[in-house]
Image (cartoon, helix red, strand yellow):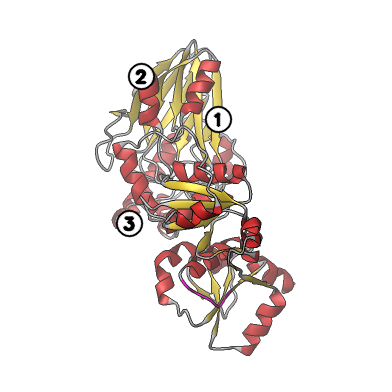
Amino acid sequence: MLLEKIKTPGLSHLSYLIGSQGKAAVIDPRRDCEIYLERARAEGLEITHIFETHRNEDLITGSPVLAKMTGARVLHGPNPADEVVFADTAREGDVFEIGKIRVEVLETPGHTDDHLAFVFHDDDYPEGPVGVFTGDALFVGDVGRTDFYPERAREVAGLLYDSLQKICALGDQTIIYPAHGAGSVCGSEMADREFSTIGHERRNNPRLRIADRDEFIKAKVEEHHYQPPYFRLMERLNLEGANAAPRVMRPRLLGLEDLGESGADHLVDVREPLAYAAGHMQGAVCLPVGMIPAFAGWFISEGDTIALIASEEDELAQAMAHLVRIGLDNIVGGYVGVIPAAAQGKAMQSIAMIDTEEVARRLAEDSEDWTLLDVRALDERQQGSIDESEHVYVGELNTRWKELDRDLHYTLMCASGMRASVAAGWLASQGFKHLDVYLGSMGAWTNAQG
């Protein structure tokens, strides 16, 4: 019997391969889905079922492509936003046999209307389920967000409460297998581990410890989450079914002249922020490889052409993989060699990094021409902020940059300086000339206060 977790870095997406007696099933596959077939066949298993816990908002499902590759049946929940053209509907109480594994369906709406949990039984041990694939209903340390139906905010929060009670009734011994881990945009308080049981979560998960339904609803309604524009693209593709991912997940290498002639809508510099700040090509935005899954979808739209700039070819490959998984795969190529480009006379731009002492000095001067702009999430800012700072969330600068004055001087800050670098890079690409980044940002400020 096999149960293997397959993690997608960046998105913190968790998918699973289960198998027994020559048969296998996949839960929530990602778009580049050959990995499931390779792992299954390496174990002598054929994939017969693909289970979707819900229509994902933050990545493209690989279910339609994997189904074509294997002939497997795709199962999705009832009440989707529209027809899921590549899947059959699974309902409460449906049971599927995968060798000696028995998979039972629970309807668990709340995060989305179509949400399902899949309960995993081992027929050799009939006293209660072994585990449950909880999708985005229950995480380790958190529960699913419920902000996708704002006009029904209290209703869907109540539905999630009821669904969680149903999951908890499976018994404390039941291992939970969520669809995301820490770092995912699908929850803000997930624990930094990917293993737990229902018993442990009942005792320790802050949301599960709220026993009163109305209190739970109030807590969920008061949460604040951001919805990047690319979520709408994911919603559509996960109903219609996206094309297969490119077979080769490395962009074509571009020379310096090719890069200049590419005509790409976006030059995306995927190096680390300090490298970008020290010197980058004119018009390039700052999106470090590890931050692409969280922020590329704020600034890049479906169909936009992309040219990548990196320190090495492996960075180009990682960046392309992240972009493909969220449907931004119109990549014209990648360039490696910013320093050689500078040596050839290519004009470079830079963004200064300043420290706490300089920020404090500017705050004391209280200049009308300078603004400290905090780009953290609203809940972070509510936990602590610099009084004189202004706030625009980094992602919302995709359009709200128009509210800012290009003639003024902005210092960007976040928790450490990473997101501030993304924000500064975006503003620089929009023609802002007077920018710098508070290196260390809120972390440095807090430490300086003692």
- Secondary element at image label 1: strand
Q: Is residue 400 above or below residue 132?
A: below
Measured in 3D between alpha carbons, the distance from the residue under mark 1 to the one under mark 3, in whole angstroms, is 33 Å
Sooner in the amino-acid sequence: mark 2 or mark 1: 1
Residue 150 is tagged as 3
The disc, 3 or 2, on the residue closer to the chain's N-terminal end is: 2
Q: Which residues are magenta?
A: 431-435
Q: Nearer the viewer, residue 25 or 438?
A: 438
Residue 2, horizontal then vertical, whole percent: 55, 19
- Looking at this view, name the residue that lies furthest to the left: 83
* Residue 376 visible in image: no
Position of residue 72 in the picture relative to residue 84 (left or right): right
Give the residue at mark 1.
Answer: 5
Distance between mark 2 and mark 1 Cα atoms: 22 Å
- For marks 2 and 1, give the one nearer the viewer: 2
For the point 52% across and 61% down, the residue is 284
- The disc labelled 3 sits on which kind of residue? Pro
User: Disc 1 residue type?
Assistant: Lys
* Foreground residue among 418 and 22: 418
Q: Quadrant of the C terminus?
A: bottom right
The residue beneath circle 2 is 71
Kind of residue at badge 2: Gly
Prevailing secondary structure of the magenta residues: loop
